[in-house]
Image: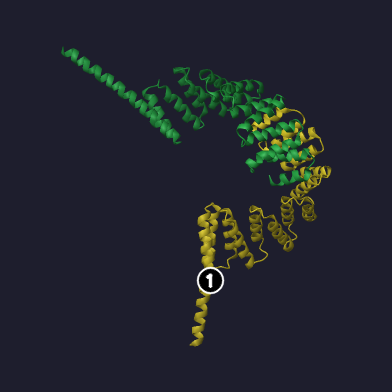
Chain colours: A green, B yellow
Amino acid sequence: MFIIRMFNIALCLFILCTVCIAEETEYFDWKGSKLLASRNYTGALQYFDKALNQDPSYLDAWVHKGDAQRAMKDYNASLQSYRQALKIDLNKTAAWSGLTETYVALMDYARASAAAERVTKLDPKNKANWLKEGNLLQSQGNYKEAAAKYDGALALDPKYKDALYRKGISAMALDNISQAIGLFDQILETDPSHKYAYNAKGLALEAEGRYLEALEAYNKSLEIDPKWSQPLVNKMNALLALGKQDEAMKNFVVI
Amino acid sequence: MVRTLSLALCLFVLSALCAAEESSTYFDELGSRLYTSRNYTEALYYFNQSLNENSSNLDAWIHKGNTQKALKELNESIQSYKNALKLDGENAAAWSGLIDTYIALKDYANASASAARTTEFDSRNKGNWLREGNILQMQGRFEEAVIKLDGALALDPEYKDALYKKGLSLLAANRASLAIELFDQVLAKDPKYKQAYNAKGQALTTQGKYSEALEAYDKALKIDSKWSLALINKMHVLLHLKKQKEAMDIFLKI
């Protein structure tokens, strides 16, 4: 009877201890996350390590550790942490997202694309995932594949400006200028202060040799942001194409 | 007795003056050190101290003007330079400060007038002629700028900056071939002059020589691969050449 009672007490103590340790791990991870948010990366890393020392299978701490290492530009270590997280749960979206960002930082766009594709597969109802995939493909010059991803984003939200804009750039690269102009116009219908759409529309019009209209588009972009150098330089080039050298050089000397 | 008293008084006044001058110089130096370390507010405090001790301290007025300019107190800065010029009407540093402040205010008319004054009293300085030319170009007065740039080239026919700027004026006047000759002169003297390659690219574009323009931009980008001006210009030439994909590759990188 005494032995059974002692055994029960020991069991209770063991369970209590385990619960306490688990709570402490969670606390360390929470504390690290707070420091990460306040950009104290070294301090954050110490807490994530404490959490992982107590429980090496604590998934969130691996992801957060990867985030802190990425912020400290320790990219290889960051990749390692995200991979550890994925060993625990292959479907952890945050770990795949972290991997994507780290590969982007390393300019390894092929691997970044592959990781981003996993994120979209895991969370296909998130339009930003489709956009991200598209942007990475564009960075590699894969404009056609990128357009398919933007279509994925636009299927979820047909008025998604970023996807319309990027799809327009793909259309331009694929020599479908009128489609590009149509897409930029769609953005401008919903957001007339979208300076990027005006600027890109100007380029599309230039590609068609419609220099006067291009000039108008650049001017509209500059009305929104007079100090943005890109449409200024574009405007100068449109003026040169129109044979207005004097005006073009007036722009040139003040850029 | 009276003579001794007078002598003592003179000595006292003289030493007081010397002390004021010395502390004025000391405060000015302290301010200059703070200015160098970009602590403009404190620097201004010391320049004011310096001028309180000796309002004829020319350097302190100029340094005060520079500091006010750095603090974007442009009108106050102009006043300080003018005070310096009251003490020495030909002080080059005061004129330079004044001109730069007018440019910052986009008051090109006054900047031009001030620049013309510096050329007047120091006409052997090619930099003065160049500056006058540059300010005229900023106002779109390309033809008048050429006269000033020729003034600089009369003093130094190999003056790269003047050759380059004169090329820009010629380009504005639709004389692309002559402009290209000048840019080539610059490049013969200095193959690292990226601005000349870029401007040459633009001159070639106006002549419809797109492949050669592309080559010029590529040379500018070899010198500075991240220079957005040359990148954007290259993108436009690619659009002219119907190479949309390559153009968009650049567009995404800018």
Please state the horizontal and vertical placement of residue B216, each as a whole percent of the image: 76, 36
Which secondary structure lies at badge 1?
A: helix
Q: Decide: is B219 above or below B8.
A: above
Q: Residue at x 61, y 60 (%)?
A: B78
* Amino acid at dot 1: Cys
Please state the horizontal and vertical placement of residue B125, each as a whole percent of the image: 73, 58
- The local crowd at label 1, few if under 14, some if 14 to 19, many if 20 or more residues have their Cα within 10 Å, is few
> Dividing the image into 4 quarters, which one contains the C terminus of chain B?
top right
In the image, farthest residue toward the bottom: B1
Q: Is residue B9 left or right of residue A202?
A: left
Which quadrant holds residue B101?
bottom right
> Is residue B45 shown to the viewer in this render?
yes
Q: Residue at x 45, y 21 (%)?
A: A85
Q: Choose between B230 and B5: the one closer to the eye.
A: B230
Chain letter, disc 1 residue: B
> Is residue B223 shown to the viewer in this render?
no
Please state the horizontal and vertical placement of residue A200, each as a whole percent of the image: 67, 33
Q: Is residue B1 left or right of residue B112?
A: left
Which quadrant holds residue B118?
bottom right
Give the labeled residue for mark 1.
Answer: B18
Q: Residue at x 81, y 35 (%)?
A: B209
Please state the horizontal and vertical placement of residue A42, each as a whole percent of the image: 44, 34
